[in-house]
Image: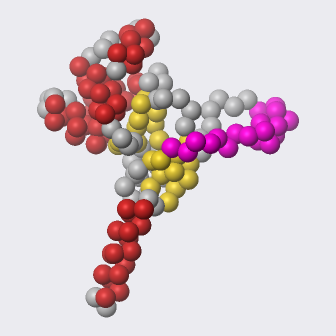
Amino acid sequence: MTELLERLSALGFKITPQRRLILEVLQESNRHLSAEEIAELVREIQPSVSVATIYRNLNLLVEIHLVSKLDLHDGPARYELNRGHDHHMVCLDCGTAIKIGACPMQEDIKNIIQEKGFEVSSHHFEITGYCKQCQLKRRIEEDKQKSSR
C-alpha cells in the first residue's frame, strides 16, 4: 500500500482518506469490483463517502494508471489495482475476472501492426462467458424451470 500512496504523491496528488480507502479496498479484494461494490465497502469504514466521490476518485486513479478499469459489455465496469499488463476471462453473471497468463499480441499481430504503420496506444483482450459457479447456478435454474412446467 505504501508504494501506491508514494506513487500517488509523486504524481502530485493528495493522499485523501477517500483515495486511501479505495486503494485499500481494491488491494484487499481477490476479484474486480464495480464502483458500487467499492462504495459499499468504503462506506462500511467511512459512511459519509458518496458514490459520486468514489466515481470521481476511480476516474482519477485510472487516468494515472494506479487502477485498471475493465469494461464489461452488459454489466458495470469493474476495477482492480493496476499490477501491469493483464488479459482476462470475465464471467457475464457475477463479474469475476480471471487473469490469463498469455497475451494475444504475438509476432503475427505485431508484424501486421508494423506493416500497416499503425501506432498502438493500448490493447485489450477478454474472453466472456460463465464461471463454474455461475454455470452451476444457471443449470439449477433451468432444471427448476423444466420441472415446474
In what quadrant of the picture does the N terminus appear? top left
**x, y percent for residue 70:** 47, 41
Residue at the farthest left position: 47
On screen, residue 44 versus residue 73, left or right, reads left
Nearest the viewer among 110 and 101 is 101
Is residue 136 covered in magenta? Answer: no
On screen, residue 15 versus residue 83, left or right, reads left
**Res. 8 in view:** no
**x, y percent for residue 82:** 46, 29
The figure's colour scheme reads secondary structure
Q: Is residue 126 above or below residue 142?
A: above
On screen, residue 87 versus residue 67, left or right, reads right
Q: Residue at x 50, y 60 (%)?
A: 129
Residue 34 position by quadrant: top left
Q: Residue at x 48, y 24 (%)?
A: 65
Q: Is residue 135 above or below residue 91?
A: below
**Res. 17 in view:** yes
* Total count of labels: 0
Residue 93 position by quadrant: bottom left
Q: Residue at x 33, y 26 (%)?
A: 23
In what quadrant of the picture does the C terminus appear? bottom left
Q: Which residues are magenta?
A: 99-118
Q: Is residue 28 above or below residue 8?
A: below
**x, y percent for residue 41:** 22, 37
**x, y percent for residue 2:** 35, 15
Residue at the farthest right position: 115
Is residue 103 covered in magenta? Answer: yes
Q: Residue at x 65, y 29 (%)?
A: 121
On screen, residue 122 versus residue 71, left or right, reads right
